[in-house]
Image (cartoon, rainbow, N blue to C red):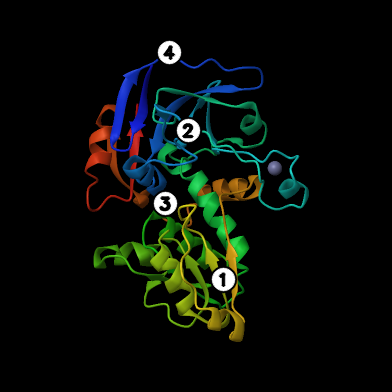
């Protein structure tokens, strides 16, 4: 079968490899479509300490495929059920991440197959169903944000994640304001239930850029007594400056949000199937697997997500 292998930053190759063999409890899924996302683009550019540990590394983690004649989606991880985080009902401390969706076939390991593989509801396009993983991360972020009805929620970042977060905030009863992004995103911002704005004085700020500047900016924007959710990850050694005066004297709450849970994954699949928002508009490009390295090497300016077909 064909698979994309990341040899080094900037060096992505499509190669002929043996079809993977599922072990006991694993399932073998034939990929119908995989989606690109911002993490993959970052990993392509500068490598990734967790997602691309080996060389060459399998690549891609958002997908929809066929398992025993049924259309399914799978998350790229599942909680271990045994660690301290799992025991407390918090995020699992022992997550490992499935990659290899840019390929003809993928083996989903037993741990994920047991809880985080789901049949796609009828009528949901494969490329929409494949968004279940990022949308589940967004729903986790909304959970962590503790949004109340009527809250103004500033979202830093107008990419696919920012737009998904906007839809989640709107459905939670908040007023999403998307900060940043080019004027041509305006139409999409509105379609996903939000408006564009500066976000100053928001009740809640969600950082979804993943830069030190945006972390600092998120703490600057929120109102006194407000909540900031750090959704975008930074490199391990990052130490973004924060305004200690505001944190202390204005009693800000700062929380992290990472990844998803089985509950938010199930909710995300239902949310996609509801058709409440034009999810399909987030897929702006379609390429064959062979064309993927060229797409990553020179991403189109208007790229949100690309559907990659083997
Ligand atoms: Zn765990």
User: CA separation, marks 1 and 3?
Assistant: 19 Å
User: CA separation, marks 1 and 2?
Assistant: 35 Å
Task: Tell me if I can see residue 16 in this picture.
Answer: yes
In the drawing, what numbered circle is on residue 173?
1
Q: Quadrant of the C terminus?
A: top left
User: CA separation, marks 4 and 3?
Assistant: 34 Å
The earlier-in-sequence mark between 1 and 4 is 4
Q: Secondary structure at mark 4?
A: loop
Q: Quadrant of ligand 1?
A: top right
Tell me: is circle 3 under 8 Å from ligand 1: no
Whether 133 is drawn above or below 154: the answer is above
The earlier-in-sequence mark between 1 and 2 is 2
Within the image, what quadrant is residue 6 found in? Answer: top left
Task: Tell me if I can see residue 156 in this picture.
Answer: no
Q: Which residue is mark 2?
A: 99
The earlier-in-sequence mark between 1 and 3 is 1
Within the image, what quadrant is residue 212 found in? Answer: bottom left
Q: Quadrant of the N terminus?
A: top left
User: Depth-wise, is mark 4 or mark 3 nearer the camera?
Assistant: 4
Q: Position of residue 9 (x, y in %)?
A: 32, 38
In the drawing, what numbered circle is on residue 279?
3
Q: Is label 4 in contact with label 3 (beta carbons under 8 Å)?
A: no
Residue 284 shown left or right of residue 73 in the figure: left
């Amino acid at each position: 079968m064909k698979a994309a292998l990341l040899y080094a930053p900037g060096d992505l190759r499509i190669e002929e490899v043996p079809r993977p063999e599922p072990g006991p409890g694993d399932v073998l899924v034939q990929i119908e479509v995989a989606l690109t996302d911002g993490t993959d683009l970052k990993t392509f550019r500068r490598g990734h300490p967790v997602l691309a540990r080996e060389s060459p590394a399998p690549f891609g983690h958002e997908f929809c495929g066929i398992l025993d004649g049924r259309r399914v989606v799978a998350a790229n991880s599942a909680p271990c059920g045994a660690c301290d985080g799992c025991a407390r009902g918090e995020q699992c401390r022992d997550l490992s991440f499935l990659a290899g969706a840019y390929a003809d076939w993928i083996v989903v390991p037993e741990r994920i197959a047991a809880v985080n593989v789901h049949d796609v509801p009828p009528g949901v396009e494969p490329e929409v169903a494949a968004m279940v993983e990022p949308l589940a991360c967004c729903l986790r972020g909304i959970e962590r944000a503790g949004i109340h009805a009527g809250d103004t929620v500033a979202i830093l970042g107008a990419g696919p994640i920012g737009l998904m977060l906007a839809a989640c905030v709107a459905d939670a009863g908040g007023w999403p304001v998307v900060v940043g992004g080019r004027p041509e995103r305006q139409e999409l911002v509105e379609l996903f239930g939000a408006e564009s704005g500066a976000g100053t004085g928001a009740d809640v700020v969600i950082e979804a850029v993943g830069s030190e500047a945006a972390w600092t900016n998120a703490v600057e924007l929120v109102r006194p007594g407000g909540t900031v959710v750090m959704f975008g990850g930074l490199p391990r050694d990052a130490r973004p400056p924060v305004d200690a005066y505001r944190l202390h004297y204005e009693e800000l709450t700062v929380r992290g949000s990472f990844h998803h849970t089985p509950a938010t994954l199930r909710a995300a699949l239902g949310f996609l199937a509801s058709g409440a928002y034009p999810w399909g508009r987030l897929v702006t490009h379609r390429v064959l697997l062979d064309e993927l390295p060229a797409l990553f090497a020179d991403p189109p300016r208007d790229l949100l997500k690309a559907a990659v077909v083997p």
